[in-house]
């Protein structure tokens, strides 16, 4: 993983010192809240319903055990003993005191972490495939390109005050595990006409009040032009993006108002007229950054493990976990293990300080000193010897972390909702827990098959409800919390925005509504179809009739 150089260390320390002074002035009454607000937001500090929330950047979702232990320490010392992993592969602490924030930032700096650009109208944390460098369907590791984008965009003088926040995701594999089509810019590493790798570039995706699937602006972009081309996209957005209406300010609105052809024309014109070759990536710098992401030295291991085979044949719970939470690695004899943070009864994405410290220990013992966070709010050990999987499972199981529900209904995405967020219209955590309780039987989840259920507590869509095969959105109707249900969304290569199925449901009726939807799907399913397959074949009618009765 990337290590800070001398500039990085000095820059982050200076930011901590600057913010310490700003906090002291705020506490002394020398700064009003209106004056302090833009300063705290530039450091990832939000004022939510009950306390300050601090959002910590985890670039492209990669953590070392040392960093994860430090996060656990921060949660125990300055929060309530836990943190919340988000759909941006970040971590949030929701019970922070303002007076402690400078010390927290200093503790983060000790382990090469910070909160810079986790808020504000700038390029946010660049996300990536959480299986990067390990996946057996990968064309190329996207993480070095994420790091290049991170370094280029951090405090960029032209793009630090954009019309609105800006999000980029990069994938290098056949399967899209980074939801690139729902980002302001989505990059997929592809093979070009000359056999060299480059990028397919999507632009204008996003969720929120007006969801859009990103559109292709370039089928192939040579690697050396990555920064200059993205800079031209941002220049056009910065010039023409609206600043008079926060709800119309995202690049997705501009792309869809101009049309992708006109937007492409403007970007290409800027690219040719300004500096197409002026900021091409120096080869030596690319090699330097690439060197930080060299794969670990994985000693040869047998492909099959007798202990694992015996356990699979005698322990059905282990066999189910193995099937869903353990994925093939690019190196034979190794596996990638998903640690679910979705045990029934727990808040999706929450991890206690004890959990963070345990996973850090396991990463050192079994995972070649690396942990990943995925956007579906789980943790991942990317490089585990297959012969260690049984021992790892037993350690996870003893800690209540061996729930085998990855990519099943129980693997819900859920935002903090009205329990924490002052933007939310409705609670999301209690509803998610009730749904998880209703479907906690893993055999039932396996019968249902792969299914993405996402839930948001407001239209801002932090829970990615638009891209859920089943999406739930909490809304406020004259003081009553109601929940709209949408069907048919997808975050993958067949990306789609879900369709609202009908009027919203009261909170207590939502679990039964989901049960009815699942029952309808199983009744309509043929030939082992997934939920999305069935929806696309039969359409909304049978689901509407089951939920609301025949028209």
Image (cartoon, helix red, strand yellow):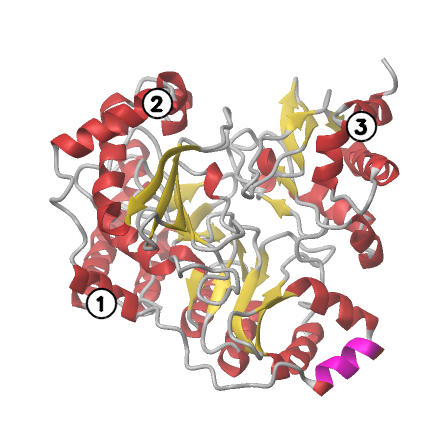
Asked if the stretch drawn in magenta spans residue 209, the answer is no
Mark 3 Cα shell of 10 Å, populated few (<14), some (14-19), many (≥20): many
How far apart are labels 1 and 2 at the CA level?
Answer: 37 Å
Disc 2 packing (10 Å; few <14; some 14–19; many ≥20): few
Comes first in the chain, label 1 or label 2: 2
Q: Relative to residue 427, is residue 123 drawn left or right?
A: left
Which residue matches tag 1? 288
> Is residue 100 in sight in this rendering?
yes
Identify the element where label 2 is drawn. Answer: helix
Q: Which residues are magenta?
A: 307-313
Residue drawn 38% across the image and 46% down it: 45
Image location (x, y in percent) of residue 422: 51, 34
Give the SS element for disc 1: helix
Does residue 418 appear in this view? no
Measuring from the top left, give residue 328's x and y in whole percent.
59, 68
Contact check, label 1 and label 2, Cβ < 8 Å: no
Q: Which mark is residue 167?
A: none
Q: Mark 2 sits on what residue? A: 261
Label 3 sits on residue: 543
From the viewer's side, name the closer residue of 98 and 448: 448
User: Number of callouts in the render?
Assistant: 3
**Mark 3 vs mark 1, CA separation in Å:** 54 Å
Q: Residues within 10 Å of mark 1 (few under 14, many from 20)?
A: few
Magenta: main secondary structure: helix
Q: Nearer the viewer, residue 54 or 307?
A: 307
Q: Earlier in the sequence, mark 3 or mark 1?
A: 1
Q: Is the C terminus in the top left, top right, bottom left or bottom right quadrant? A: top right
Where residue 352 sits in the image (x, y, percent)? Answer: 58, 63
Task: Give the residue drawn at x 56%, y 53%.
Answer: 377
Q: Nearer the viewer, mark 1 or mark 2?
A: 2
Element type at marker 3? helix
Residue 309 lies within the magenta run: yes
């Amino acid at each position: 993983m990337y290590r800070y150089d001398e500039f990085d260390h000095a820059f982050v320390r200076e930011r901590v010192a600057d913010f310490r002074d700003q906090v002291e002035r705020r506490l002394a009454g020398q700064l009003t809240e209106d004056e302090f607000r833009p300063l705290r937001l530039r450091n990832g500090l939000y004022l939510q319903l009950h306390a300050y929330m601090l959002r910590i950047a985890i670039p492209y979702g990669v953590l070392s055990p040392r960093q994860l232990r430090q996060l656990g320490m921060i949660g125990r010392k300055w929060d309530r003993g836990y943190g919340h992993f988000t759909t941006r592969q970040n971590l949030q602490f929701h019970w922070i005191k303002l007076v402690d924030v400078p010390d927290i930032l200093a503790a983060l700096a000790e382990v090469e972490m910070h909160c810079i650009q986790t808020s504000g109208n700038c390029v946010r944390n660049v996300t990536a495939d959480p299986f990067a460098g390990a996946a057996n369907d990968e064309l190329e590791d996207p993480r070095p390109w994420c790091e290049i984008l991170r370094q280029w965009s951090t405090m960029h003088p032209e793009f630090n005050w954009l019309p609105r926040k800006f999000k980029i995701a990069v994938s290098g594999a056949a399967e899209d595990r980074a939801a690139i089509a729902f980002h302001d810019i989505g990059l997929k590493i592809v093979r070009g006409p000359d056999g060299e790798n480059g990028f397919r570039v999507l632009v204008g995706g996003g969720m929120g009040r007006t969801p859009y699937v990103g559109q292709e602006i370039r089928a192939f972009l040579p690697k050396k032009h990555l920064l200059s081309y993205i800079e031209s996209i941002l220049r056009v957005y910065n010039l023409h993006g609206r600043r008079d209406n926060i709800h119309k300010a995202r690049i997705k609105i501009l792309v869809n108002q101009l049309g992708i052809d006109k937007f492409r024309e403007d970007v290409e014109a800027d690219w040719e007229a300004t500096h197409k070759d002026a900021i091409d990536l120096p080869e030596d710098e690319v090699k330097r950054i690439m060197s930080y992401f060299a794969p670990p030295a994985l000693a040869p291991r047998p492909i099959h493990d007798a202990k694992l085979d015996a356990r699979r044949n005698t322990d059905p719970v282990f066999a189910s976990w193995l099937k869903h939470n353990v994925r093939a690695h690019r190196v034979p004899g190794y596996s990638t293990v998903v640690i679910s943070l979705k045990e029934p009864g727990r808040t999706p994405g929450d991890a206690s300080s004890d959990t963070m410290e345990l996973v850090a220990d396991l990463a050192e013992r079994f995972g070649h000193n690396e942990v990943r966070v995925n956007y579906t709010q789980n943790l991942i050990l990317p490089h585990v010897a297959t012969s260690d999987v049984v021992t790892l499972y037993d350690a996870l199981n003893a800690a209540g972390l061996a729930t085998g529900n990855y990519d099943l209904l129980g693997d819900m995405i859920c935002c903090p909702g009205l329990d924490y967020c002052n933007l939310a219209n409705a609670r999301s955590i209690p509803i998610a827990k009730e749904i998880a309780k209703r479907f906690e039987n893993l055999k039932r989840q396996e019968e249902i098959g792969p299914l993405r259920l996402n839930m948001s507590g407001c239209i801002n869509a932090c829970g990615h409800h638009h891209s859920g095969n089943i999406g739930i959105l909490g809304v406020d109707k004259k003081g009553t919390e109601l929940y709209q249900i949408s069907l048919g969304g997808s975050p993958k290569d067949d990306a789609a925005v879900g369709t609202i199925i009908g009027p919203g449901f009261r909170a207590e009726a939502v679990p039964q509504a989901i049960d009815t939807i699942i029952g309808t799907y199983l009744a309509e399913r043929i030939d082992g179809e997934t939920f999305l397959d069935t929806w696309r074949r039969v359409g909304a009618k049978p689901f509407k009739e089951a939920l609301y009765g025949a028209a």
